[in-house]
Amino acid sequence: MSDLNKIALKILSNGKGILAADESNATMTKRLEAVNINSTPESRLAFRETLFSSENMKECIGGVILYDETINQVSNSGQKIPEMILASGSVPGIKVDTGAKNLANSFEEKITEGLDDLRYRLKKYYELGARFTKWRAVYNINNKYPSKLAVHSNAHALARYSALVQECGMVPIVEPEVLMDGDHSADICLIKTSEVIQKCFEELILHKIDLKGLILKPNMILDGKNSKNKISNEEVSFKTLECLKRSVPSEVPGIAFLSGGQSELEAAENLNLISQNNNTNFIMTFSYGRALQQSALKTWSKDIKNIKETQKIFNHRAKMCSLASQGKWSKELESK
Ligand code: 13P
């Protein structure tokens, strides 16, 4: 087993998944201001370290994706944040793209940037303790998009990023996110997501990526947010599995879904059905941001001193996601 494969399995195995706490300062500011909290380096750290020191980190969270600010911070108890994550048996990770920018010659679409000084930044993050990384590409669906140009250029960037990350001894998370926005059907989402993921693997293979040392972070196959039709959760699981079976090479050890705007409940229920119906060899788990943090953030904002109450909420969500990744989640457990 290669070292990269070992890291990937440590993050994903035994009912564990990933906590995506890598919101940029701009995004985190939006989330904090929405619950009337002033966004400062101190308040961002205070919320995040409340999560990282929660009890169920040990049993349920195999990896935490950090943002540049957080990986350089020290907790109130004097521990460096990557050390705090390691102490709970979890692997520290880092978001390394520098965001999605307008794509030249297709201005309504995005290209994710961050390749220029990446080799240098990766070394620094490795020294700080990171052992995996994240790069997110985003694609819109409508009658024109995603264009071939967006599909190709983002796949190329994801492959170049992955090659540099593996060269530095870390596991790349490859995240091609086809957005929920729009009124498209789940079948269109299935076609477009398959096309996007297939192009990513074409480029990853061209760039000689060790597929056993990589984690795919895709969207689930859903109807567009504004679509009048809503397929059942069971159908979401079948269509998602169909898409992944046709698009992902069997060497890839695991798939960690983003929640992408689903509610906490939907994200747990859909993952649970995907795991129950999983007829592939891939580990299926979560790499959730909002679907792990939303309720905890609401509770925290009411009384930032009441760490216990926030941790209680986060522990429950982490446990629900962990059970869902093993196909053992139920609505009854959810309300306990
Ligand atoms: P959400 O689960 O909130 O979609 O966030 C996951 C993520 O890391 C997006 O890049």
Image: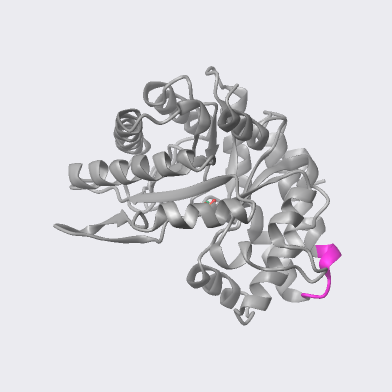
* Image x and y of residue 186, in percent: 37, 37
Q: Is residue 252 left or right of residue 143?
A: right
State whether residue 314 appears in this view: yes
Q: Nearer the viewer, residue 33 or 26?
A: 26
* Image x and y of residue 292, in percent: 65, 52
Placement of the N terminus among the 4 image quadrants: top right
**Residue in view at x 44 percent, y 49 percent:** 135
Q: Is residue 83 left or right of residue 36?
A: right
State whether residue 261 appears in this view: no
Quadrant of res 28: bottom right
**Residue in view at x 42 percent, y 22 percent:** 249
Q: Residue 270 magenta-drawn?
A: no
Quadrant of res 14: top right
* Image x and y of residue 121, in percent: 47, 57
Relative vertical location of residue 278 with respect to residue 304 in this rendering, above or below: above
Q: Residue 308 magenta-drawn?
A: yes
- For the rendered model, the colour scheme is one colour
Q: Which residues are magenta?
A: 304-309
Residue with the most extreme left position? 105
* Image x and y of residue 277, in percent: 57, 22
Q: Is residue 272 left or right of residue 244?
A: right
**Residue in view at x 72 percent, y 71 percent:** 46
**Residue in view at x 18 percent, y 47 percent:** 144
